[in-house]
Image (cartoon, helix red, strand yellow):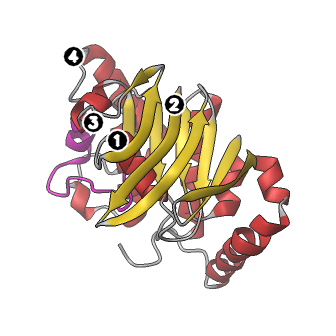
Amino acid sequence: MLVIKNLEAFYDGIQALKGISLHVGKGEVVCLIGANGAGKTTTLHAISGLIKRTEGDIVLEGNSISRKSPDKIVRLGVAHVPEGRQIFAPLSIPDNLRLGAYTRKDKKKIAEDMEWMFELFPRLAERRENLAGTLSGGEQQMLALGRALMTRPKILLLDEPSMGLAPLIIKEIFRVIEQLKNDGMTILLVEQNAKAALKVADRGYVLETGKIVLSGTAEELSQSQDIQRAYLGKAVDGFLAECSTGDKDDTEDGD
């Protein structure tokens, strides 16, 4: 579905990607894990055309998309759920979802997909007439994911879907990712919560300072002592620390 070859890119004048290569097969969930500043978000931005690569190529279903504009990349089947959600706060939940389908003309199917989103995210169904800006952080993440799915993508790019969310909401988000995986959705997942990412992924890549330093199946990476020391220990400790504060049903930061 997606092949990245020797990709180099700069972010704010700094070389963020230093010749990375990876691939995502149709129906796979592949995760990118790494510390802040490793180049994970830059990779997704390069795929979506939000930043320009300086070297290398990005190939979707056998065709290069490296020189295409972001809107054309969306039309080709790439949907991006950005870090920070970036929903349209003054608009209602249905209007946000309709904007996700702006490239489509099949009104009947769009209406059917709207109802599918409300089935997939019951919390959105309960608040369907609310303005998006009144939603909690977890509900906004659900809305951002639903908006991307309304494009009927060939591949879904997810950037830190668990960021800032309480454990119960993280569990719900990853339940949906697991359901999409079972339905055959192709997903490239950027996630600092390595434990949660590797649990749902088929394969993974580890990025450090713009380079891929390790790759393998999710099981192989989960069992790697280097990964356990660098990422899984922190993820588990952080998760247990959040749980010890009590079962909250929304974001830790009060979004």
Density class for disc 3 (Cα within 10 Å; few <14, some 14-19, many ≥20) is many
Residue shown at the point (35%, 62%) measured from the top left: 84
The image quarter containing residue 131 is bottom left
Q: Position of residue 255 (x, y in %)?
A: 35, 72
Density class for disc 2 (Cα within 10 Å; few <14, some 14-19, many ≥20) is many
Identify which residue, 114 or 215, lies in the foreground. Answer: 215
Which residue was labeled with disc 4?
Answer: 105
Q: Earlier in the sequence, mark 1 or mark 2?
A: 2
Q: Position of residue 209 (x, y in %)?
A: 53, 66
- 1 relative position to 230: left or right: left
Question: What is the magenta range?
Answer: 81-101
For residue 100, the mark is 3
Density class for disc 4 (Cα within 10 Å; few <14, some 14-19, many ≥20) is few
The image quarter containing residue 230 is bottom right
Q: Secondary structure at mark 3?
A: helix
The Cα atoms of the two marked residues, 1 and 2, are separated by 12 Å
Residue type marked 4: Lys
Q: Earlier in the sequence, mark 2 or mark 3?
A: 2
Residue 103 colored in magenta in the image: no
> Is residue 201 visible to us here?
no
**Marks 1, 3: nearer the viewer:** 1
Density class for disc 1 (Cα within 10 Å; few <14, some 14-19, many ≥20) is many
- 37 relative position to 9: left or right: right
Relative to 156, does residue 77 appear above or below in the rendering? above
Residue shown at the point (46%, 45%) measured from the top left: 7
Residue 99 colored in magenta in the image: yes
Which residue was labeled with disc 1?
Answer: 48
The Cα atoms of the two marked residues, 2 and 3, are separated by 22 Å
Q: Secondary structure at mark 1?
A: helix
Residue type marked 1: Ser
